[in-house]
């Protein structure tokens, strides 16, 4: 079959379903094991290649995210395994890593805890880019299995342990980072299929107003932070003011926006 015809047809189908047509080229390129930029150089593909491309594209048409089909996603330039047990790492969270690295360097921090680690993307990205000892926990054993694999594959030595929030945390840290579940329970049904059907509910549901886990972090973080320690958290859109007022007994340091200009990260000092 002519590749150009298949590309056109898939892009048309994706467009009709509101799926970014760029994904058609990503799928074809990953099946043919070439870069998307090299697709223009290919004229014909075999029937077998065509069937595989159609099989993968069919999953994308069910709104399964590309990384959950392919089984990996790049975050902070690092390749992470993803599956249905973990939240797919979001590019929007890279600003949290940037901010953590900034304060690790400025303050000479040596110990970091990643609370609610999921795929381990924050913990691994920090460990790979700073001379710190990193611990990371999650309540989900399945998520921890993925996180451990991601740390192993990326040569990052991290102390992973299972914990319901701070329950099994025994040490104090210079820096605590967290991207907790923060979607308000009432908003979950309105999420795009890509998120609602394929990210674990336990990674999304932040309870009433999405604030359940920020309340837990607020009530416990000081106990687990060293004196000059900091807390860096990801927040949902429109949560900045609520979370800043919840943490009014901490020293507010700064608020950062993501690539889309949305408030995304808050920094507090103990
Ligand atoms: C929004 S995801 C963040 C994952 C990852 N840190 C990231 O930034 O992509 C939230 C994570 O919190 C975990 N989680 C949910 N409830 C928890 C709890 N009670 N204690 C610890 N972790 C919890 C979920 O399993 C999920 O991995």
Image (tube, rainbow, N blue to C red):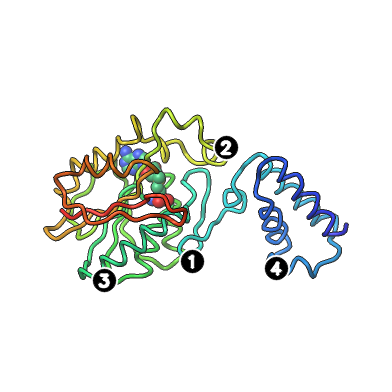
Is residue 233 toward the left or the right of residue 31 in the image?
left
Under circle 2, the secondary element is: helix
N-term-proximal mark, 1 vs 4: 4
Q: Are marks 2 and 4 in contact (CB under 8 Å)?
A: no
Callouts 3 and 4 close, C-beta under 8 Å: no
- Using the numbered discs, state the Cα–Cα distance from disc 2 to disc 3 in whole angstroms: 39 Å
Residue bearing mark 1: 77
Q: Are marks 1 and 4 in contact (CB under 8 Å)?
A: no
Q: Look at 48% across and 60% down and name the residue there.
A: 75
Residue assigned mark 3: 105
Which of 148 and 129 lies nearest the eye of the viewer?
129
**Residue designated by label 4:** 37
Q: From the viewer's perspective, tell me whether residue 4 is left or right of residue 213.
A: right
| Helix, strand or loop at mark 1 | loop
Q: Residues within 10 Å of mark 3 (few under 14, many from 20)?
A: few
**Mark count:** 4
Quarter of the picture for ligand 1?
top left
Q: Position of residue 87 (x, y in %)?
A: 46, 46
């Amino acid at each position: 079959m002519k590749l150009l015809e298949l590309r056109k047809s898939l892009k048309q189908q994706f467009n009709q379903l509101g799926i970014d047509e760029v994904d058609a080229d990503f799928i074809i390129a990953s099946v043919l094991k070439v870069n998307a930029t090299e697709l223009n150089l290919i004229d014909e593909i075999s029937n077998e290649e065509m069937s595989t491309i159609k099989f993968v594209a069919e999953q994308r048409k069910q709104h399964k995210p590309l990384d959950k089909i392919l089984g990996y996603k790049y975050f902070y330039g690092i390749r992470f395994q993803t599956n249905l047990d973990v939240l797919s790492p979001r590019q929007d969270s890279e600003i949290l890593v940037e901010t953590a690295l900034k304060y690790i360097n400025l303050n000479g921090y040596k110990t970091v805890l990643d609370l609610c680690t999921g795929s381990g993307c924050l913990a691994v990205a920090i460990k790979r880019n700073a001379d710190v000892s990193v611990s990371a926990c999650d309540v989900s054993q399945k998520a921890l299995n993925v996180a451990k694999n991601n740390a192993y594959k990326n040569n990052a030595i991290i102390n992973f342990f299972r914990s319901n929030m701070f329950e099994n945390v025994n040490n104090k840290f210079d820096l605590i980072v967290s991207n907790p579940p923060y979607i308000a329970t009432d908003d979950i049904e309105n999420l795009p299929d890509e998120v609602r059907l394929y990210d674990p509910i336990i990674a999304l549901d932040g309870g009433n107003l999405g604030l359940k886990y920020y309340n837990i972090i607020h009530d416990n973080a000081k106990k687990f932070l060293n004196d000059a320690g900091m807390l860096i958290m990801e927040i949902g859109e429109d949560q900045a003011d609520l979370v800043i007022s919840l943490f009014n007994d901490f020293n507010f340091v700064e608020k950062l926006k993501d690539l889309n200009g949305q408030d995304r990260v808050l920094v507090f000092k103990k």
